[in-house]
Amino acid sequence: MLTLDKMKELGIDPTEGLTRCMNNEVFFFKMITMAVSNDYFETLGESLKKNDLDNAFEAAHALKGVIGNLALQPIYEPLAEMTELLRAKKELDYVSMYRPIKEIRDQLLALTQS
């Protein structure tokens, strides 16, 4: 079950995101559930595996906005960095870069489903 304490255990300070959701914890958790369930996470992972930088950029850019609005910093910060690198079409090991993003996302997703 997703709680503010569980978020803190994942390194997320829920204060800003909660404020953006009018301090309505139920609404905040609903928005997080929608965000971490976003199909763009799978699109990003698959595009990176295929080295399809254009589709990966589109997915990363979309996710950056959603995740940033909820102030989920441990996902947002590396995702924002990845988005800019993809925008510049830098040749990097994006799959490895994506792994910690996906791990935190998967942990949040599991919490929303329990």
Image: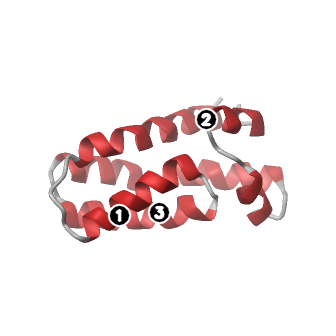
Look at label 3 and name its amino acid: Lys
* In the foreground, 90 or 106: 90
Answer yes or no: is residue 39 visible: no
* Relative to 73, 19 lies left or right: right
User: Which residue occupies 43% across, 52% down?
Assistant: 78
Give whichever of discs 1 and 3 has the lower sequence position: 3
Residue 60 coordinates in the image, percent (x, y): 37, 61
State yes or no: discs 1 and 3 in contact (Cβ < 8 Å): yes
Which secondary structure lies at badge 3?
helix
* Quadrant (top left, top right, bottom left, bottom right) of the C terminus: top right
Give whichever of discs 2 and 3 has the lower sequence position: 2
Look at label 1 and name its amino acid: Thr
Between marks 1 and 3, how big is the CA–CA gap? 8 Å
Look at label 2 and name its amino acid: Leu
Between marks 2 and 3, how big is the CA–CA gap? 18 Å
Q: Which residue is mark 1?
A: 83
User: Which residue occupies 42% across, 55% down?
Assistant: 79
Give whichever of discs 2 and 1 has the lower sequence position: 2
Q: Which residue is mark 3?
A: 64
Residue at the bottom extreme, as displayed: 88
Mark 2 Cα within 10 Å, few/some/many (few <14, many 20+)?
some
Which secondary structure lies at badge 1?
helix
Residue 61 coordinates in the image, percent (x, y): 39, 67
Q: Which residue is mark 2?
A: 10
Mark 1 Cα within 10 Å, few/some/many (few <14, many 20+)?
many
